[in-house]
Structures are given as C-alpha cells and as structure tokens.
Image (tube, rainbow, N blue to C red):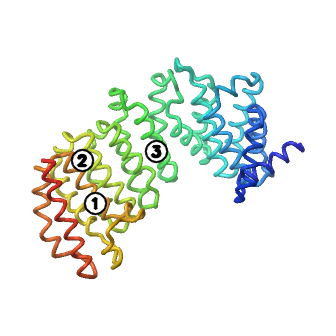
C-alpha cells in the first residue's frame, strides 16, 4: 500500500510544471521494472479514490507501455497476471463512472488487443469480442460508446474471424448509426464505420458490401458539423485520400454535402476547409471519377476564390511580406492551395475557364475595408492564373 501511495506521488510529479521535478520523476519511473509498472498503473486506474488527473496519467502511461514495450514486458507476465490484466480492463470499462477515464481504458484495451492478434490473425483475447457484442446491445449508453470506441481504435479486432462476423459487424454499425435518440452514438458509429472501411481499403468486395453504410456516414458528417464536431468529416477526408472508390456509389451526395458545408459561412473556418479538402483530395486520388461531376466542380471553384479573398481587415496583415504561422490556417491560404491542387488534379483546361467566368465579377465585389486589402486580393487571384495554366 505504501508503495502504491509513493507511485501516486510519482505520477503527480510526472505532471509537474517544474522541469527538475518532472525530469527526476521520469528517471525514477523509467527504472521501475515493466511488470511492476503494469501492476501499479492498473491499480491506479482502478482506484476511484485517487485524483482524476492521476488516474488519467496512469491510463496514458499504461497504453503507451503496451504500445512501445509489449514484447519486452507482457509475455514475461504469468498466465494469471495476463488474465488479471484483461479482466481488470473489461471490468473497469463496465464499472467506471468517469467518461474520460473510461475512454482512456478503452484505448488501453484496444492497444492490448492489437498486440494479441497474432500473425495468423488469431485473437488471443476472445473475451473482448463477446464484450463488444454484449456492450453494443446494452441499454447503458456509456457501454455502447465504449464498444464503438474500441472498434474505431482497432477495426482489425476480429482478426481472421472477420469474414465470419461480417454481417454482425454491419448490423452493429447500421443499428448504431440509426440511433436518433443518442447523437453521440451515431457519431461514434460513423467514425467506426469509416475506420473499418479504411482498414479494409484493398478489399473491393468488402467495400462494395459496406457501400450502403455511406449515407449514414454522410448524415453523421452533416449533423456532427453543426454540433461543432468535425471528427467524422476528418474521417471522410481520410476515405477520399485512401479509399476514394468507396465513395463512387454515392459520389454525387458526397460532393453536394461537402459543397454545402464549404459554402456555409456560419460554420467554423476549419470545418469549411475540411469539406473543401474532401473535394480537392478526390481531384488528386480519383480525378476520373470527379471529372464526371463537372457541374459540382464548377460550383466549388467560386468557393475557393471566395476563400482566397477572405482577408483579415488589418492594414499590417495586408502589407506584410511573409505569412505568420497562424496565417497558414486562414481561408485565404486554404483557398489558394485548393485552387492549385484541383487545377493540377483535374487539369487546367477544365479549371481555367471556370476561373475566368467568375474572376472578374469577384474583383468588383470583394468585401474588404481598404484599397490595400483589395489590391492584395486582386494580386492573389490574378497570380494564380499562370500556375493554373501550367497544369493544363
């Protein structure tokens, strides 16, 4: 007990703002044997009387330990200790009342499971699969969230049994994405579905079989964005980058949604830029697919141009020779980059006529405060024309 209390103090010192205290704590922690670390960390996570930040730190360290040193530590544990670790993790997820702690324990469980699927695809922790199925059908929303979080974190959890469970997986995701009463479940299910698609991006038959999940993912993108959550939208960007063919059956709907989000000035700039990123990424990874939707491309280009002239109402900014770090997240920079990329992806012959159609009316309608800003905006628009022409 005294050793555990000392370990709590050590965890606190690892979070110290004093560099000397933190460095000494790191040295002490590094010298603790790996098997002892697992025991101390697991006990700290399960101790409801310990401070929340201490328990969170313990959870982060245990996940990191399993990620970086699994082969050096875990096989050396006794069979009883290995079983105890698995049991304690699942019990913690079921009994934990703190959402933050539960989420971090789910991360640990996913990391352990990732290491327990052998080279032949055998999952050496079959109990976790039963836990997933039981939890995703539980009345407790927290348990359903936990199951989806684990699956999102490690979609390969079924190993060589994946084909056998394919219909069950699909049914699980569809059921959760249709849970109108719990938007957080819909969001997590959409992220989990996207993660599963990405992990199987080379399996054409599977992607085709799961194509009817895409409308649910798109619905979750739309609804979560208006709740200030862009996590599903980021997943859609990843799909556009890694598995663009998955979007083919619903490409029109995908593009229309992204165009709508990109055009909505009520959304945060980052969300609008991410929506644009889906379209631009597709121009690079699936140009042939996107060229069949030139009407939407023609509507997207004005959005890029509008972003390019979305300038700060700041004389110093307008006259600056170099961009600061924060400026690289600005709409102006995002729009300029997007225009270059889509021109190179689809070809300047497609993009340049669209630009010419819109550029003159925009030059007269730029809503900036002063002549310097308007001049800067004009320069930004005009100087892109040569680079776009080069992509022809």
Q: Marks 1/3: CA distance?
A: 27 Å
What residue did someone put label 3 on?
191
Dot 2 or dot 1, earlier in sequence: 2
Question: Where's residue 78, x and y in %?
Answer: 76, 22
Question: Where's residue 260, x and y in %?
Answer: 29, 59
- Left or right position of 43 against 258: right
Residue lying furthest bottom in this view?
Answer: 370
Q: Marks 2/3: CA distance?
A: 21 Å
- Name which residue lies at 73% across and 27% down: 83
Quarter residue 208 falls in: top left
* Neighbour tally class for label 2: few under 14, some 14-19, many 20 plus, Cα within 10 Å: some
Of circles 2 and 1, the one toward us is: 1
- Position above or below: 173 against 385: above
What residue did someone put label 1 on?
335
What residue did someone put label 2 on?
252
- Position above or below: 120 against 388: above
- Left or right position of 392 against 335: left
């Amino acid at each position: 007990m005294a050793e555990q209390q000392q370990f709590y103090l050590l965890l606190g010192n690892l979070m110290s703002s004093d560099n000397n205290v933190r460095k000494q704590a790191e040295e002490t922690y590094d010298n603790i044997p790996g098997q002892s670390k697992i025991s101390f960390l697991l006990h700290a996570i399960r101790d409801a009387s310990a401070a929340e930040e201490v328990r969170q730190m313990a959870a982060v360290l245990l996940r990191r330990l399993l990620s970086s040193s699994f082969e050096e530590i875990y096989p050396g544990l006794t069979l009883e200790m290995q079983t105890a670790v698995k049991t304690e993790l699942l019990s913690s997820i079921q009994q934990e009342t703190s959402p933050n702690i539960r989420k971090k324990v789910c991360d640990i469980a996913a990391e352990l499971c990732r290491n327990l699927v052998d080279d032949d695809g055998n999952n050496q922790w079959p109990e976790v699969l039963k836990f997933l199925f039981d939890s995703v059908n539980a009345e407790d929303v927290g348990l359903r969230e936990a199951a989806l979080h684990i699956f999102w974190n490690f979609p390969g959890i079924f190993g060589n049994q994946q084909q056998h469970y394919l219909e069950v997986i699909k049914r699980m995701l569809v059921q959760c994405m249709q849970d109108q009463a719990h938007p957080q479940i819909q969001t997590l299910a959409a992220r989990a579905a996207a993660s599963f698609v990405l992990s199987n991006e080379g399996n054409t038959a599977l992607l085709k079989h799961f194509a009817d999940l895409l409308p649910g993912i798109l619905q979750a993108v739309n609804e979560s964005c208006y709740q200030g959550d862009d996590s599903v939208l980021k997943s859609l960007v990843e799909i556009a980058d890694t598995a663009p063919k998955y979007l083919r059956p619903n490409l029109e709907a995908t593009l229309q949604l992204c165009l709508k989000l990109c055009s909505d000035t009520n959304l945060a700039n980052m969300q609008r830029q991410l929506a644009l990123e889906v379209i631009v990424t597709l121009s690079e990874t699936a140009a042939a697919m996107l060229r069949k939707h030139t009407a939407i491309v023609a509507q997207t280009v004005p959005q890029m141009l509008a972003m390019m002239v979305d300038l700060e109402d700041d004389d110093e900014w307008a006259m600056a020779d170099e961009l600061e770090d924060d400026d690289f997240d600005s709409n102006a920079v995002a729009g300029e980059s997007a225009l270059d990329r889509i021109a190179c992806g689809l070809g300047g012959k497609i993009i340049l006529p669209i630009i010419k159609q819109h550029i003159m009316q925009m030059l007269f309608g730029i809503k900036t405060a002063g002549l310097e800003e308007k001049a800067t905006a004009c320069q930004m628009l005009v100087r892109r024309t040569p680079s776009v022409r080069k992509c022809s």
